[in-house]
Image: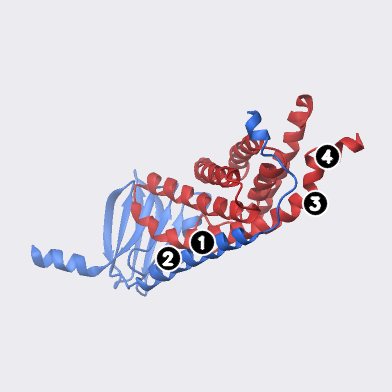
Chain colours: A red, B blue
Amino acid sequence: MIPSRNKAAFLGVFLALALICSYVESLIPFYFGIPGVKLGLTNLVVVMMLYCVGAKEALAVSVCRIVLAGFLFGNMFSILYSLAGGLLSFLAMVLLKRTGQFGVLPVSISGGILHNVGQICVAALVVENYNIFYYLPVLLAAGFLTGLLIGVAAQGVIRRVGPFLSGEKRRKGE
Amino acid sequence: MSSMENHVTTKIRGTGRRDLIFIAVLAAVLAAFLVLSAVKKEAGVSVVVTVDGERYGSWPLSKDEEVPVTIDGKTTNVMVIRDGMADMTEADCPDQLCVHQKAISKNNETIVCLPNRVVVQITGGEEGAYDSIAK
């Protein structure tokens, strides 16, 4: 594992990466007709960390990313929104990964779907109107698709970058 | 927390049969859900605006109208009814998500402005009509 003195720097690099993903995503006028549907590029970083670094590190970076990105590119509501989606999606991914039965794709897909479930729940609570669950089918399908795309990308990244991150190859270089 | 670290592995399996089954079943369920919800769509008759969960007012979709939503003396959103569709044309929030959203006309469709807690929703006329008859 990572030596503790390097940990802050090591995780800081991931946080920077996740923030850049947030920024890139905020630049793309990605619009599918309903608010809340996004590619979820930062989930690529979270999935990668889940496999290559560790669950609690992934959670820490994810939460810091959401709060910082909210201040930088969004507002209080986007933090609330993202936090609900991010935490629920993280929980789903960790649990599914822990079963040991599935690969990266199902883990990422469940993350994508649960992210949207978390968001619509917060939205319903904030506006005190439960009719917005009308959009649930579309949001679930969108979460599935974005999760699948991110999963395919994450699989490729983990395969190529994973050995360096876990220290197998890093130590040789030191 | 060492148990978490035990799960760290760089050797990941490729996409196996179990993964494909998981994906296929999930895709089928979601597609069915999507189709079912699309089939149920029917044209609405009126539009209801709620602010903070409380009813602000309702307007028939048949009459073109511009409805400013005023909260605490400040107009935060403008909803426009045109050609039987309701659309949010103005909002004073920075994200403008509700303004970007397409005009709605089908029963139960909604436009939500999260920062102002404004919800624009289409309702079916039938229940309303029955209510007025019952009265």
Q: Could you say which disc has been placed on residue B26 in the image?
A: 1
Of marks 4 and 3, which one's residue comes earlier in the chain? 3
Chain of the residue that carries numbered disc 2 in the rendered image: B
Q: Are marks 1 and 3 on the same chain?
A: no
Q: Position of residue B93 (x, y in %)?
A: 49, 49
Q: Residue at x 79, y 48 (%)?
A: A161
Q: Amino acid at mark 4?
A: Glu
Q: Which mark is residue A160?
A: 3
Question: Do the residues indicated by labels 2 and 1 lie within the same chain of the protein?
Answer: yes
Q: Which mark is residue A85?
A: none
Badge 3 and badge 2 both on one subunit: no
> Are dots 4 and 3 on a single chain?
yes
Task: State the image coordinates of residue A31 (x, y, percent, origin top left).
Answer: 56, 62
The one nearer the camera, B67 or A99, is A99
What amino acid is found at the position of numbered circle 3 in the picture? Arg
Disc 4 element: loop
Label 4 resides on the chain identified as: A
Q: Using the image, name the chain to which the residue with label 1 belongs.
A: B
